[in-house]
Image (tube, helix red, strand yellow):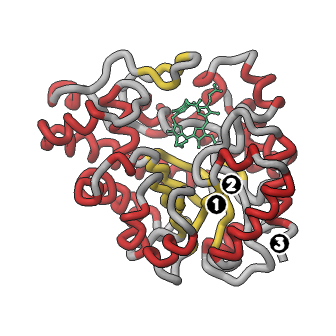
Amino acid sequence: MLKNDLFLRALKGESVERPPVWMMRQAGRYLPEFRAIREKYDFFTRCRMPEIAAEITVQPIDIVGSDAAILFSDILVVPQAMNIEVLMKEDVGPWLPNPIRSAADVDQVIIPNIDETLGYVMEAIKITKEMLDNRVPLIGFAGSPWTIFCYAVQGQGSKNFDKAKAFCFTQPIAAHTLLQKITDTTIAYLKAKVKVGVDAVQIFDSWGGMLSPADYQEFSWKYINQIVEALADETEVIVFGKGCWFALGDMAQSRAKALGVDWTCSPKNARLFAGNDITLQGNFDPSRLLSPIPTIKKMVHEMIDEFGKDKLVVNLGHGILPNIPVDHAKAFIEAVKEYK
Ligand code: CP3
């Protein structure tokens, strides 16, 4: 039995004493303990060493006191398993030496056997569960098919993912074939995570906001919804689409249990678009953690008041930034725990 099940209760829409809180990218560079491990092993090596991944996952539970853990890994281990080379370059971020640019390239992409290619993630989950000892639930995650596609085609991060969009609009058949391969792989991957014990899964559509509302339906939501449908009977699914406020209404009609909201959409508007039945997750501006601690606490309480304390998972509107002082991250979590 979980000692702290606030997060799961909020996902089910139950009334809670106070909302649960965790932070996207909470296992990361703002923690000195994370940076110490980072000096010893490169990024994907850390992901592939289950003991190390588990240790990093548990750090924010011990240090800042989040109500849920999220497995340390990366959305880009999925394209790696699909026969797409992905490197992490210092100061550049993800780097794909051979981006997908043609139907022939799409043919080379495989739908892998998950245990053979991503077994190390399942090992990390098992070790993490032991280390957590039922203190808090564990979240597993994957990138949305569109967000993975963005990296696979663009070859690196981008301000507008112009090459990824060009591929969709000039070679739609090949684009849809690739999106479907990513979707099928992601469903098998998340099912495997649920089988070894994650308590919920989050789909990160970090670049969904690059698309117009109509294109979002065709190139992103259609595939995310397949994943939601495939997982809904087995676990709680959270969908976070950055910049996707326009899709909250459709998302709320799906079988997702919660919807992530970024800080550019007010809590009031998020509720208006999503309706009152579904749990929302968000949406503190990550840069606002640079404000003085009393300001952070005041703003967190105002945010909870605006969302309402029920059907809410407090989070940032995107990942925590590396330059946030650890005390400020702690103050964010404490503010939620102090909410009355
Ligand atoms: O939330 C957590 O703490 C769990 C770990 C996690 C990481 N990446 C670790 C990571 C999660 C959930 C992700 C998801 C991820 N990865 C996303 C979706 C969420 C989002 O932020 O939009 C995306 C787009 C990626 C791809 C990715 N990985 C980028 C663009 C980068 C480089 C930019 C950056 O933030 O450094 C990464 C590297 C990465 N993934 C780091 C971490 C802790 C930093 C690597 C390092 O230690 O140098």
**In the displayed structure, would residue 307 be above or below residue 186?**
below
What residue did someone put label 2 on? 138
Q: Amino acid at mark 2?
A: Leu
- Cβ atoms under marks 2 and 1 closer than 8 Å: yes
Indicate the quadrant containing the N terminus: top left, top right, bottom left or bottom right.
bottom right
Q: Amino acid at mark 3?
A: Tyr
Q: Nearer the viewer, residue 97 or 45?
A: 97
Q: In which image quadrant can residue 43 be found?
A: top right
Ligand 1 within 8 Å of the CB at mark 2: no
**In the displayed structure, would residue 136 be above or below residue 277?**
above
What residue did someone put label 3 on? 339
In this rendering, does residue 168 appear at all? yes
Q: In terms of secondary structure, where does tag 3 sit?
A: loop
Q: Nearer the viewer, mark 3 or mark 2?
A: 3
Disc 1 packing (10 Å; few <14; some 14–19; many ≥20): many
What residue did someone put label 1 on? 199
Q: CA distance from mark 3 to mark 1?
A: 25 Å
Q: Is residue 4 left or right of residue 303?
A: right
Q: Nearer the viewer, mark 3 or mark 1?
A: 3
**In the displayed structure, would residue 93 be above or below residue 11?**
above
Residue 13 is situated, as x and y percent measured from the top left of the image, at 61, 79
Q: Nearer the viewer, residue 322 or 191?
A: 322
Q: Nearer the viewer, residue 318 or 175?
A: 318
Disc 2 packing (10 Å; few <14; some 14–19; many ≥20): many
Residue 173 is situated, as x and y percent measured from the top left of the image, at 13, 42
Residue at image position (67%, 82%) is 14
